[in-house]
């Protein structure tokens, strides 16, 4: 009965946002919900919290969201693979690179593809926030993020999940249903998430943002997925440009615009994130980890790991 209520909640929510999914009832039936919660803080914000698992891989095209006239969709997608007994969910290991935890920002007027991967447990907080409301909190700093408020351009921003954000996502997703002063709590936690996100975005290199088409976005993610699938060896920029269907200059500009890092720095960052995961979760040795992500010189691996993670591998392991 609870599963049916959760699925009905998801369908009703989509209709309320102006993005009906009634024709996707067959696919929705494939979802196993641990939790779904909607916090209506309109007209400024709406917060959606869900924890679920899909029995099969499927996707659907989400239409522009109309419940807020001018705003952003900010999705904190913290994806967990492996066994998660405390939630009563079995999550077989899958391609970790393809389901990397991240934060995504898109304008509400942009249609987008929503994907569910087979047997991957998703914990997600999505915040719809009105542009004017967000600007109040950014104050004089809002000029740094003018690209987010220019509705004449289509943009798509993807940011790494920082430890602070990941911890908050986990806290909110697993908060008690009987939390005191719920509207106050969820507004506060949402603003806290937005604070950490914009703090991270403020550290990005300042660049001029180009207009992006849906085709551009799809091409950029083809490149990103190719990079993530080859962490032991950097793919040549010319090969990636061919994969994207763009010239190399445009690819480099749009890739940095979306991910905040250039092609090779992004590759190196992914390598170090995977190395950290292998050390912590798979309990590989430092040498095994280094070789796994393509290093033959372990001293070089150690220096690069320290540069990205703040400590040499062995010291980092002892701290975590």
Image (cartoon, grey):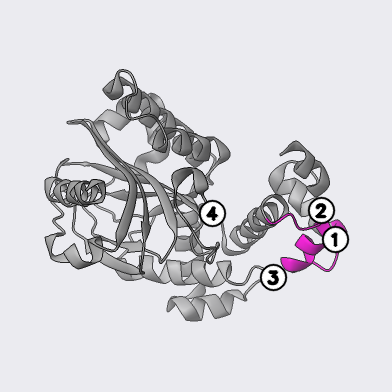
- Is 127 displayed left or right of 239 in the figure? left
Sooner in the amino-acid sequence: mark 2 or mark 3: 3
Query: Residue 115, position in %: x, y?
Result: 34, 63
Query: Residue 267, position in %: x, y?
Result: 62, 62
Q: Do the residues labelled 2 and 1 touch (CB within 8 Å)?
A: yes
Mark 2 and mark 1: Cα distance apart in space:
6 Å
Q: Could you say which quadrant of the image residue 294 lies in?
A: bottom right
Mark 2 and mark 3: Cα distance apart in space:
15 Å
The residue lying at 81 percent from left, 41 percent from top is 315
Mark 1 and mark 3: Cα distance apart in space:
14 Å
Which residue is under mark 2? Answer: 302
- Residues in magenta, as a range: 282-299
Sooner in the amino-acid sequence: mark 4 or mark 3: 4
- Is 15 displayed left or right of 252 in the figure? left
The magenta stretch spans residue 290: yes
Q: In this view of the protein, which residue sits in the foreground, 27 or 243? A: 27
Which residue is under mark 4? Answer: 83
Looking at the image, which residue sits at the far front? 1
Which secondary structure, mark 4?
loop
Query: Residue 163, position in %: x, y?
Result: 57, 39
The residue lying at 49 percent from left, 81 percent from top is 242
The answer to whether 310 is drawn above or below residue 65 in the figure is above
The residue lying at 74 percent from left, 47 percent from top is 307
The image quadrant where one finds the C terminus is top right
Sooner in the amino-acid sequence: mark 2 or mark 4: 4
Mark 1 and mark 4: Cα distance apart in space:
31 Å
Which residue is under mark 1? Answer: 298
Alpha-carbon neighbours of circle 3 within 10 Å: few (<14), some, or many (≥20)?
A: some
């Amino acid at each position: 009965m609870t599963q049916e209520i959760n699925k009905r909640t998801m369908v009703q929510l989509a209709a309320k946002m102006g993005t009906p999914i009634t024709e996707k009832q067959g696919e929705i039936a494939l979802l196993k919900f641990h939790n779904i919660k909607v916090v209506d803080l309109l007209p400024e914000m709406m917060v959606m919290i869900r924890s679920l698992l899909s029995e099969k891989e499927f996707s659907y095209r989400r239409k522009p969201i109309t419940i807020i006239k001018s705003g952003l969709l900010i999705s904190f997608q913290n994806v967990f693979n492996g066994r998660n007994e405390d939630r009563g969910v079995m999550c077989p290991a899958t391609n970790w690179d393809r389901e990397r935890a991240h934060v995504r920002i898109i304008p509400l007027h942009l249609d987008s593809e929503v994907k569910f991967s087979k047997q991957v447990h998703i914990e997600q907080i999505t915040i719809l926030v009105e542009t004017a409301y967000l600007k109040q909190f950014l104050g004089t700093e809002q000029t740094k993020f003018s690209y987010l408020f220019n509705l004449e351009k289509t943009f798509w921003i993807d940011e790494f999940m920082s430890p602070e954000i990941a911890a908050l996502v986990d806290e909110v997703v697993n908060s008690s249903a009987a939390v005191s002063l719920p509207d106050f709590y969820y507004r506060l936690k949402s603003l806290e998430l937005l604070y950490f996100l914009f703090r991270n975005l403020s550290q990005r290199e300042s660049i001029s943002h180009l207009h992006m088409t849906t085709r551009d976005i799809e091409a950029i993610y083809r490149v990103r997925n190719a990079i993530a699938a080859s962490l032991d060896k950097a793919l040549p920029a010319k090969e990636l440009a061919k994969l994207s269907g763009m010239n190399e200059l445009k690819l480099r500009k749009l890739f940095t615009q979306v991910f905040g890092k250039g092609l090779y720095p992004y590759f190196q960052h992914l390598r170090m994130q995977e190395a950290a995961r292998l050390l912590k979760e798979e309990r590989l040795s430092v040498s095994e980890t280094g070789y796994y992500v393509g290093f033959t010189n372990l001293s070089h691996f150690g220096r690069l790991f320290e540069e990205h993670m703040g400590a040499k591998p062995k010291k980092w392991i002892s701290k975590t």
